Amino acid sequence: MNIFSFIILVINIFCELFFFALITRIILSWINISPYNPISKITYQITEPFLGKIRQYIKPLGMFDFTPMIAIILLEVLQRVAKSLLMYLNNLS
């Protein structure tokens, strides 16, 4: 395993963990769990920096907050771009 494969693996693991944190946050918002719950606190601490940046540009529409869906799309796009770029760099070397 070369360095590019290792970096791709780390990016994939990070993106998958962040994806599951976003899904957990979405489910917790439907359940209406206490914000003092440890799982809720950790999930919000992990996802809020990214979602907060998106909310600066895209405001919630009434009761609907589309930022988690946009975050999932952006995460997928960033993951694919990074993987393609690293595979291209790997082929050059």
Image (spheres, rainbow, N blue to C red):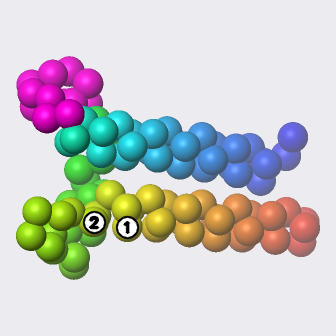
Instruction: Out of 76 and 46, give the one closest to the viewer.
Output: 76
Looking at the image, residue 90 sits to the left or right of residue 42; the answer is: right
- Measured along the vertical axis of the image, is residue 16 above or below residue 80? above
Look at 49% across and 60% down and name the residue there: 75
**Magenta segment includes 36:** yes
Left or right position of 40 against 3:
left
Q: Where is residue 76 shown, x and y percent of the image?
A: 55, 62
Residue 93 visible somewhere in the drawing: yes
Residue 83 position within the rendered picture, expressed as x and y whole percent measured from the top left? 70, 62
Query: Callout 2: helix, strand or loop?
Result: loop
- Residue 53 position, x and y percent, is 24, 66
Q: Nearer the viewer, residue 24 or 91?
A: 24
List the single residue furthest toward the bottom: 57
Amino acid at circle 2: Phe
60 lies above or below 49:
below
Whether residue 56 appears in this view of the structure is: no
The residues colored magenta run: 31-42
Determine crowd level at label 1: few under 14, some 14-19, many 20+ residues with C-alpha closer than 10 A. some
Kind of residue sitting beneath label 1: Ile
Q: Establish if 32 lies above or below 60.
A: above
Pointer 2 residue: 66
Tell me, for residue 70, which label it has, or none: 1
Q: For the point 90% across and 67% down, which residue is it?
A: 91
Q: Residue at x 87, y 40 (%)?
A: 1
What element does badge 1 sit on? helix
Distance (Cα) linking label 2 and label 1: 6 Å
Q: Quadrant of residue 33?
A: top left
